[in-house]
Amino acid sequence: MSNYEKQYQWASEQPEAFWGEQAKSIAWYKAPTKMLENDDNGIERWFVDGTLNTAYLALDYHCEQGRGDNIALIYDSPVTLTKRQYSYSMLRDQVAQTAGMLANFGIEKGDRVVIYMPMIPEAAIAMLACARLGAIHSVVFGGFASNELAVRLEDAEPKLLLTASCGIEIDKVLPYKPLVDKAVMESRWKPEKVCVLQRSQCPAELNQERDADWLSELEKATPHDCVPVLATDPLYILYTSGTTGKPKGVVRDNGGHAVAMKYSMSAIYDIPQNGVFWAASDVGWVVGHSYIVYAPLIHGCTSIMFEGKPVRTPDPGAFWRVCAEYQVDALFSAPTAFRAIKKEDPQGNLIGQYDLSKLKTIFMAGERLDPPTLEWVEQHTDKPVVDHWWQTETGWAIAANPTGLETLPIKPGSSTKPVPGYHVQILDELGEIAPANQQGYVAIKRPLPPSCLPTIWRNHDRFESGYLSQFEGYYVSGDGGCIDDDGYLFIMGRIDDVINVAGHRLSTGEMEEIVGAHPAVAECAVVGIHDELKGQLPMGLVVLKDGVDTNDEQLKAQLIAEVRNKIGAVACFKEAHVVDRLPKTRSGKILRRVIRQIADGEQYVVPSTIDDPQSLGEIEAVLQND
Ligand code: COA
Ligand code: AMP
């Protein structure tokens, strides 16, 4: 039996023994004696009686082990022309001081703190400072509009909001403070304080009553110690798109998360403790939480925080420049980033200008890794490229090529095999296990391994109904796919109203709510259509109310502006068409899949349940003419 198979079998057959062994690799205050127990909701919880502190594991522990001078975090910002390095002891001191500042604001264990910040070290420091106090952070991606921030404030009910005066996107300075002020005004929940880190590119005006200046508050603070928490206490809430306008607050606990993070650094990424790991993502996404902040630091290696883009900061050689400059061992990003590089440097000319000898593997996730991108990156870098599949809900890979256990042969289009701990099965409509190669619901047999969500913040019913109740004993991922004869998993895409735009998870249901709220719109459908660069882009079809006299072009511009205004630029909603009717089943369900197939120019079968087959021809005509 191969090493991977041995571990996989052990984790499947004896999950408690397997994870009990992995749990020994982190420094608990009190090691757990109960590995797996159901909570009051009947949800499996890991390491229930263990106590720890995640920030201690990420920083203090390494300093105590004599690694205080090692580099923990490198900040590289081509947009501000800044480079900064933090040793473990420097980062620990800054986090302790920031935790003291939070404590001065009255933050205690269990309190929520919302963090709305760009890719600067203070964002990671703020997350770790919350963890140090046992407070629960909720990071909101800087590309989201004020409405999205307001929705999250209402749901998380934070005492404090931490922000910066601006973000910087390639050549634009984006003032954050007006967005924050609007969000706080719109939200029914008001944080007691808004603490602002002033950036010289665009200092913000502070409201004397409510706002505080980060640096002055930091100066007044004294370092705060790590507060022990239970393994099952939440470390963070991260909101992710579901099928409606209300995002889901994925809850991550401390203990299971720390153990899974540590395990993944060796088993999946094969990183030595003194290695350099670079997740070119954003702290606002789960990849940033897990692999910019927590996993590399818990493991003890160097993490890179890059405030830039794969292209135009300043050129498509940015990734290779950073890999060479910091001797990166493993690079992790979304396929869309590499498609952007490929578009601007098709021959990969810039790759050859950098010394990539240290770079061992390139990991990709966030969306399906299309075979042409895989091939291009492999060919031009001469490095193995590993696709791995995961979700905000799990916090780490469900399926991967476990390079630290054994590198399995790569099959283009597949995220390889389930990671030890995940029992992935393909189910049909009835919940029966589908035969090999047959597509169905990608589900994970419970118990889920450590780090997976135990609930949706303050909405356990949504966790049950959205993931657990469809097939008893399974977690349903929301993705469709199949497993081939060799046990390789192929993820084919979402089977719900979630789309992936440039590796960003967005809800078409939410876009439909915004478009449908326009006074001229009777009904609408938003679907994700194929895009060469971003993987998918949203496209809307709208039916006007009878008697509405409107200019179609003006209406489209208003809809596009409204989605940008409500969700943010990152939604990339730039295409809307006016049609006479939407294709529906006789029971009134909109046939979104067929709309998508028509828009993508794919062959489609007219569903037998369709009410009005002519509507399809009309859509084809509108899309061709517009
Ligand atoms: N703050 C504010 N605005 C942001 C933002 C942020 N953090 N991130 C993106 N935006 C804005 C962009 O400025 C752009 O605005 P515009 O319409 O005014 O030009 C819009 O949102 C769309 O951004 P994006 O989809 O990122 O497009 P892009 O053309 O700027 O860049 C890529 C394209 C492929 C280079 C970029 O999307 C990328 O690097 N993707 C990698 C994805 C990733 O890291 N995913 C995380 C999972 S691993
Ligand atoms: P997020 O929660 O933002 O990480 O998005 C999770 C979703 O992104 C998954 O449910 C998939 O639809 C998609 N996804 C992530 N990684 C992959 C991958 N390697 N292959 C295919 N789809 C992926």
Image (cartoon, helix red, strand yellow):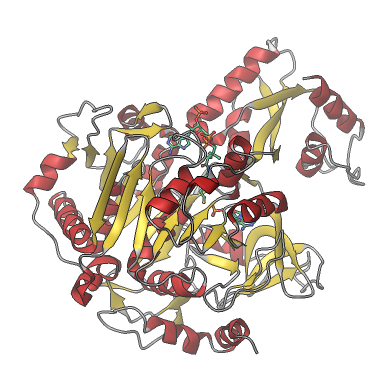
Residue drawn 79% across and 32% down? 582
- Residue 107, horizontal then vertical, whole percent: 20, 54
Which one is in front, 540 or 599? 599
Q: Residue at x 67, y 58 (%)?
A: 479
Q: State the residue in front, 296 or 615.
A: 296
Query: Which of these two is toward me, 399 or 319?
Result: 319
68 sits to left or right of 575 = left
Q: Is residue 160 visible?
A: yes
* Total residue callouts: 0
Which one is nearer the viewer's eye here, 554 or 584?
Answer: 554
Name above or below for residue 207 compared with residue 30. above
Q: Is residue 590 visible?
A: no
Q: Residue at x 23, y 71 (%)?
A: 67
557 with respect to 173 (left or right)? right
Q: Residue at x 27, y 83 (%)?
A: 30
Please state, as top left, top right, bottom left or bottom right, where the N terminus lies in the image.
bottom right
